[in-house]
Image: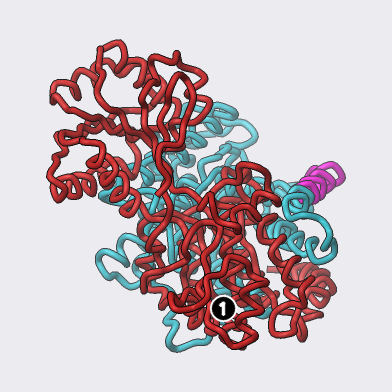
Chain colours: A cyan, B red
Amino acid sequence: MTSYLAAMAVFAGLYALMALGLNLIWGLAGMVNLGLVGFYAIGAYTTALLCVRFGWSPVAGIATAAVVSGATGSVVAVITARLKGDYLAIVTLGFAEVVRLVASNEIWLTNGTSGISGVPGLPRAWFSPEQVNLLYAGIVWVAVGLVALLLGRLSAAPFGRVLRAIREDEMVAAVAGKRVLRFKVQTFVVGAAVLGLAGGLYAHYVGYVAPDAFQPLITIYVVLALTAGGTGTMRGAILGAVLVVALTEGTRFLGAALPDLPPVRIAALREGVIGVALILVLSFRPQGLLPETIKPERA
Amino acid sequence: MTPSIPRRAALLGGLAVPFLANATHAQAETIRIGTLTPQTGAGGAYGPPMVKAMRAVVDEVNAAGGVLGRKIELISEDDETNPDAGVRAARKLIDVNRVVAVLGTWASAVTTAVAPLCWENKVMLFTVSGGDGITRLPHQGYIIRTQPDSNLQSDRAVAFMLGQGARKVAYLSAQTPFAVSIYERHLQDLKAGGGQAVGNVIYDASKTSFRSEVDQVLKLQPDSLFLNSYQPDLLVLLRDLFRAGYDGRRYTLGYAANDKLIAALPAEVTEGLVSYAPSPDLDSPAFKQVQTVIGANPDPYSCQTFDHISMTLLAIAKAGTASGPAIHDAVRAIGNPAGTPVTSVTEGLKLLAAGKEINYSGASGPCKFTPIGDITGCKFRFDVVQKGQSKLLQLS
């Protein structure tokens, strides 16, 4: 039981990290990035390849994952510089699919759809499976805390104020003398690095990466987490991620309460319950559970 | 950060507790076995009958008094055809439900992601995934796979082609992860059998015409063609081959040459097309039992999961204890060639209770495995299309 709750805490933490990364790009700067699973995948593959093929240490692998993902973010940001709203959403969604297709087909690099197994995690010989899960949950949540703290500082700083200005009206920000493109690229890089960090942590936790693990569904979960939690705030992103994992996993226990239903009905019921719960949150709290509050400037 | 987050998180965790307490209640008496199949996602069509087949065996055994005097409890989870969700579902089965075995993983990526959890926690994993890498994982014997890997499939296909007189075989392969590996295995097998593979033309399956690929492959003057295709591209390919006047042998895979394909093409285009597929043991009483549960044409995966649960229960009875390591140690002993041949679980349980040796073979065939957990022999069916109808040519 403890291992299970710890494992769910790990997944909640990974989703929270992704929600934080998305919050910076979308919540603060208003760029609809639906390609987050692509950056997550790049992070996971980077560290998996470095550690499995070249024997790097996981710490160096995860750090490099964040750097590579951030660098990819800068390229994507420059390419999509002129796109806004729905158009940006479509292109970034396409980016994530491209990453997944490259991972499926460039067999020499990624081992294709068979994936890369044996990614080193915590030394299993030293700890019991329960301790491994608890420790990893600790590591992931320390990462969440640090990232939330740093992004919170960034958001409160003049930098964050500019991002909010760009989100509300790019033209006004530009007229005020802000170099909009530069801010956008910087935001994309930082956000993508956080997504890559999440991917790196995922790879070392599960020990296996394959294209199937990076389906668009994860992007949808994270967007939902952020929307339900409240866009624009770090606390909202984290709460939303915990809520989504609690909902998707908590509903597994429906099966024990309804033992007479065949599993396919329980699966359908689960999807229904998750959907209804999120609709309820969004219809009664459209601003999210912990919405952004912007204090008026002192006169 | 403000302290409100941990408090809310704790609240959510707390809400889950009553459910969890419920789930671990009956642990003392029952033997708990988990199923992890795709109920939703890309494999969603396959999971429900797989669970149905397993449920039927459990009901039958429970009605006959269970195993070692204990009832069997089957806990079914949905892997959503997604390794991520599969890992979380497997964690629940292993950590919360404390199952002794996980049965039925379907997608190779799910199996590979879930496998380490199983072997670390000494839980047996039975799978129907075909990915070649799975049994090469460092699983210490905790994986049993009832689906033949692509090498075994290639070996059987080549033996059949050679038997039909094929000597110069050329290949047309859709661009998939298997396009090259299957060709290389065939190349090696054909050489060993006195034939030769003369070339492999890899094509993009989304094209609407394969005229240039067909010309390219016919230049090699093969006496037989092997079409490593999926159904939509095979349809176009067969038409282009017919137009090009090719009248040699054509071999393809069972899932590509399905009824839909045969119905969509004129009879003279499909005439003589041979396809092969791993097959359940159609004459076995166990297969007939699966038919009564699933319907007249059960898919191979349902037959295999029927055998997963049967082997698990027999191994528990043979070992005398219900645990992952016990199943791990006993799963090969229930296929003792010197024992009484058995196809039904209840019959096998009776014999084991009487202290006899058994030789179990199930709906998918004889359940014998290599040291790394691959099935050693499996039936294959070869079908030929005649006058727009598929006919069974050989089952071996």
Kindly give the residue lying farthest to the right in the view shown: A284
Which range of residues does the magenta coloring cover? A271-288
Look at the image and tell me whether residue A157 can be seen.
Answer: no
Residue in view at x 44 percent, y 15 percent: B267
Q: Which residue is mark 1?
A: B315
B86 in relation to A158, above or below? below
Q: Of B339 and A271, which appears nearest the observer?
A: B339
- Residue visible at 19% across and 24% down in the picture: B217
The image quarter in which residue B73 lies: bottom right
Q: Nearer the viewer, residue A148 or B237?
A: B237
Q: Is residue A287 magenta?
A: yes
Point out residue A6 in the picture as x, y percentages from the top left corner: 63, 75
Where B280 falls versus B228 (above or below)? below
Residue sitting at 62 percent across and 82 percent down?
B317
- In the image, B108: left or right of B317? left
Position above or below: A159 against A122: above
For mark 1, give the secondary structure: helix
Residue A219 locus on image (x, y percent)? 58, 46
Answer whether residue A191 is magenta in the image: no
Q: Name the chain under label 1.
A: B
Q: Quadrant of residue A259?
A: bottom right
| Three-letter residue code for mark 1 | Ala
Seen from the viewer's position, the closer of residues B316 and B133 is B316
Question: Residue B308 appears at what percent x and percent y?
Answer: 57, 65
Q: State the image quarter where residue B140 is shown.
A: bottom left
